[in-house]
Every structure is written in C-alpha cells, then in structure tokens.
Image (cartoon, rainbow, N blue to C red):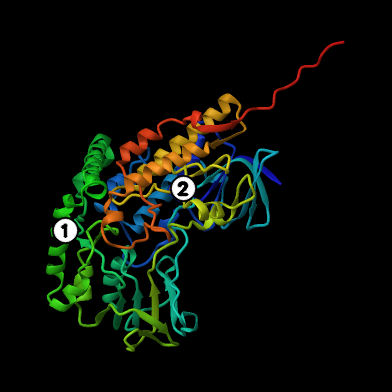
C-alpha cells in the first residue's frame, strides 16, 4: 500500500492547477489520478466536429499561465487541449500523474485519519487529503429511449466521438439541441446525406462574435504581457455586467433577447421553422448558446428539425410519437452530462459509512463554499455544488477554489491538524443563503426545466452571485468554520 500526503482526482484544469499550486507551495508529496490517457479533462474527451469554447479565449486560461498563441477570440478545442498539454509539460509535475487509472472507491478511515483509495489498476493508496477535480462534465448522460440498445447502426455520445466512422453521405440523427449539438449540427450538415435533429426544447442562440486575432495582436500578447492582461481584464469585467440580468432582474437581458430573435430571423426564412426554434421561456433560464451557423444549417434542404418526442428506436430508424419512422444509419447522442448527480459521489465514503451520493440524496447536492462537506473530513471538491457559471470562465472559479484548498493545507500544517471538516450548521447556513438568493434568479423563475436543476427542482449547479464575490469569500481558509482534529499530544516520561 502506497501513502501520499495529497491525492488529486482528475487531470483537467482543476487537477492540473491543483498539482501546480501544491508544488509552488512546497507540497511535493502528491499523486494525480486520471482515468483517461492524457491531461485535459473535458477538452481531452470532447473532440466532436466543431468543438469550441463559448467563453472568450483570454479568460479561458490560468491567470498564472497566459497563452499568447490563441488564434481566435473564442478558442477551438484543439487549441485548448494543446494549451493544457503545454502548461502540464512545462510545470514539472507530470512525474506524479498516473493515467488510465480511475478511483474505484475512497473510504475515510477515522482512527487513522486518512483516506483509503482503491484504484482501477488494483493498487490502494492512502492519503491525508483527497482533492476531487473530476468535474461536472465528466460522465456522459445517455437517454433512456426504448430500443436504443438494439439499434444496428453506429451510436455514440458527443463526448465519445467515433472518428473512425465516415459520415459522408450517411443518414444521421442528432438527439439533443444543447451546447454540443449546436456546434455539431452545422459541421455534419456539410457532409452527411440527410440529417435529422431531434429537439425537445428550443434553446436561445445569440450570434458568436468570433474573429481571428491579427498578427499585431499576437505579437503584442507575446512580447507585451501587459497588453494581454488588459484584454483579459476588460473581458472579465464586461462579462460580470451580465450577472444582474441572471440573478436579480431578467428584464435587463432584453438586449440579448433582441440579438437572439435577430439571429433566428437572419438564419431562417421559413415562418414555421422559425416558430419551432423560438423558445417559450425567458432568455437565460437555460444556458444561452452562441452560433452563427446553427440556424442556417437547420434551414438546409437536407436537414429536418423534429420536435415530436421519440417513442422508440428500431434496428434502423427513429420512431416519433406521431408514428413517423425516420431511417437512420448513425445516431449521435448529444444529451449532456450527469451534472446534478456527480458519479464520483457514489464512490466516496465518509465518516459515518455513507457515500457522498447517499448523503446528498437526503440534503441535495450541497457543500460549504462549494468545496468541503460535513461528514467527509479532508475531502476538497473543485467545481463542486453551486460553483458553476452561466456567464464567465470556470477557470476563474477553479483558481479561487485551489487557492482556498492550498491555504487549508497550509493552515493544517501550521497548526498540526490531522483533519478538517465544516461544521454542519455552517454548511447549512451557506446553502440556505444560496437557495434564498436563487429564488429570484432567471434560472428558477424563467419558466424552463434545465440541467441546472436537480430532481427536486433545486438549483444545485450555479453560483448566484458575482465571481469576484466568490473569490473574496474563498480568499482565506476560515478554520473557525471547521471541526478540527488536533494532533495527539506527546506524553513526557515522568522520572522516578
């Protein structure tokens, strides 16, 4: 059995950033476990045609590792993955990464004050602190459709794209019209013979104001770092101006609504199709998407938008509730991820013998400051409950949490604490305040059902305040909010 001081789960932005900051702070005894074969997380897994970020490039990088080489104002997936790989290579931490290895089970051993973690390679590791950077977009969510197991053509999720399949001239069906789908559909429309797009709920889609950076801008980014910092700062504060429209007064989103309606009118001429793609809920209630090519793709002659529900799938067709059977060769499932029921929670067992998922089944997905959970000592989550964003970069939130975790470890070392665990009442008060603030947000009042909400209708996904407020609240580890286990005192020998 191997022992490390810190075990980190995941090698995306969260896990890699944690490893780098641990090392910078003199914490070199750590191990990072990654189920895939490389760093990158979401950006290593999602390689579907058209994959790109909908957060401006200048914000979508570590603050401590700016990238002067972005080609576009919104980064395509290959560039983001290359950036993460470069940062990992230059950081000097990869010798403590173990790839193609997953966490099978992690159990807190209270007497020993360690986590005992069983890994998929058959080994067991004990660790004082367990940091989960597995994220909310790591486990694809497959649709529960009658007969899908018997489909005889190719079936794959957008996050598990099969690049070996030549789709040219094929009849393809895409299930879902979320963020991945609106990037996939225009790309498929270029090559497939016929494309059916199955829409349960129409999304609001605003124009993608993307452009290539000029040679002069790239030169400035590389040789005048202050220029890139100014770009990043301006974009950050511009994005923060969106917050009131989401969290306080949805009427402030009127400019975005006008952009979205104009985007529909510009891309689609047919009145019936226009009506079908126009949502019936407030803009912002569900994730606002960005694309200049989605609506024109839907308007193409060989593309059909299907709004009737799917009743079943046969060996070679999709059958809708109106009885229409549409033949298909390849089925692309773009139905999102398990965001309100993180799969890692089923494998983490706390102090009372219950898994994190069992605990959350009673309370909902909650954590103090989105990072620590009562009953689970020395467990730190990155991109935990209510840390998601609808307007800005998750890398900002991730760095805020990493700083909090590193300060927690520093505090534990300085005081000699063997474990820290948030007080139950502090965690409950934090969550009560979040849910109170959530009541006035567009996500709860906008008239839609979204993946932001759990099965009880609670928004356990998003952060309902500004990102700079989140950073301020996590600026230091507030040990007074925690139960701590003090070191066992050393008894002095009494002389006779």
Q: Secondary structure at mark 2?
A: loop
Q: Which mark is residue 366?
A: 2
Q: Position of residue 24 (x, y in %)?
A: 48, 33
Density class for disc 1 (Cα within 10 Å; few <14, some 14-19, many ≥20) is some
- Residue receiving disc 1: 257
| Residue 236 relative to residue 97: left or right | left
Q: Which mark is residue 97?
A: none
* Disc 2 residue crowd, few under 14, some 14–19, many 20+, Cα 10 Å: many
Q: Residue at x 27, y 57 (%)?
A: 285
Q: Nearer the viewer, mark 2 or mark 1?
A: 2
Q: Is residue 454 visible?
A: yes
Viewer-nearest residue: 336 or 307: 307
Question: Position of 52 compared to 127: left or right?
Answer: left
Furthest-right residue in this view? 496
Residue at x 42%, y 62% (from the top left corner): 337
Q: Residue furthest top?
A: 496
Which residue is depicted at the point 45% across and 70% down?
142
In the foreground, 482 or 274:
482
Q: Position of residue 332 (x, y in %)?
A: 39, 74
Work out whether 203 lies above or below 488.
below
Q: Position of residue 280 (x, y in %)?
A: 22, 66
Residue ID at (45%, 48%): 384
């Amino acid at each position: 059995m191997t022992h490390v001081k810190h075990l980190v789960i995941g090698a995306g932005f969260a896990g890699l950033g944690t490893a780098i900051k641990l090392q910078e702070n003199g914490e070199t005894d750590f191990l990072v476990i990654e189920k895939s074969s490389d760093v990158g997380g979401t950006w290593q897994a999602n390689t579907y045609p058209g994959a790109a970020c909908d957060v401006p490039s200048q914000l979508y990088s570590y603050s401590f590792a700016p990238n002067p080489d972005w080609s576009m104002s919104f980064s395509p997936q290959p560039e983001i993955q290359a950036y993460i790989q470069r940062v990992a290579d230059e950081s000097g931490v990869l010798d403590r990464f173990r790839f193609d290895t997953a966490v099978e089970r992690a159990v807190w051993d209270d007497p020993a004050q360690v986590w005992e973690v069983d890994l998929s390679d058959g080994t067991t590791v004990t660790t004082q602190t367990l940091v989960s950077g597995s994220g909310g977009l790591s486990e694809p969510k497959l649709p529960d459709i009658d007969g899908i197991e018997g489909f005889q053509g190719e079936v794959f999720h957008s996050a598990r794209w099969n690049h070996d399949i030549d789709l040219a001239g094929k009849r393809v069906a895409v299930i879902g019209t979320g963020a991945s789908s609106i990037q996939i559909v225009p790309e498929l429309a270029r090559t497939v013979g016929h494309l059916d797009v199955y829409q349960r709920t129409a999304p609001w889609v605003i124009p993608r104001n993307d452009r290539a950076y000029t040679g002069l801008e790239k030169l400035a980014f590389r040789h005048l770092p202050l220029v890139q910092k100014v770009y990043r700062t301006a974009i950050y504060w511009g994005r923060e101006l969106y917050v009131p429209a989401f969290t306080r007064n949805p009427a402030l989103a009127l400019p975005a609504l006008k952009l979205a309606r104009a985007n529909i009118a510009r891309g689609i001429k047919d009145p019936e199709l226009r009506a079908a793609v126009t949502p019936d809920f407030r803009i912002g209630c569900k994730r606002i998407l960005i694309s200049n090519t989605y609506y024109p793709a839907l308007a193409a002659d060989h593309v059909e938008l299907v709004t009737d529900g799917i009743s079943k799938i046969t060996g070679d067709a999709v059958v809708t509730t109106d009885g229409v059977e549409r033949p298909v060769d390849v089925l692309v499932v773009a139905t999102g991820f398990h965001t309100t029921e993180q799969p890692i929670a089923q494998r983490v067992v706390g102090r009372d013998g219950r898994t994190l998922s069992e605990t959350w089944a009673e309370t909902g997905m909650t954590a103090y400051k989105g990072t620590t959970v009562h009953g689970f000592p020395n467990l730190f989550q990155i991109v935990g409950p209510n840390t998601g964003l609808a307007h800005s970069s998750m890398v900002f939130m991730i760095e805020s949490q990493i700083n909090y975790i590193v300060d927690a470890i520093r505090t534990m070392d300085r005081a000699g604490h063997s474990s820290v665990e948030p007080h139950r009442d502090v965690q409950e008060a934090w969550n009560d305040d979040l849910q109170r603030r959530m009541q006035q947000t567009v996500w709860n009042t906008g008239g839609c059902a979204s993946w932001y909400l759990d099965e009880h209708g609670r928004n356990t996904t998003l952060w309902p305040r500004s990102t700079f407020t989140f950073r301020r609240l996590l600026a230091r580890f507030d040990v007074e909010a925690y139960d701590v286990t003090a070191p066992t005192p050393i008894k002095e020998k009494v002389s006779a």
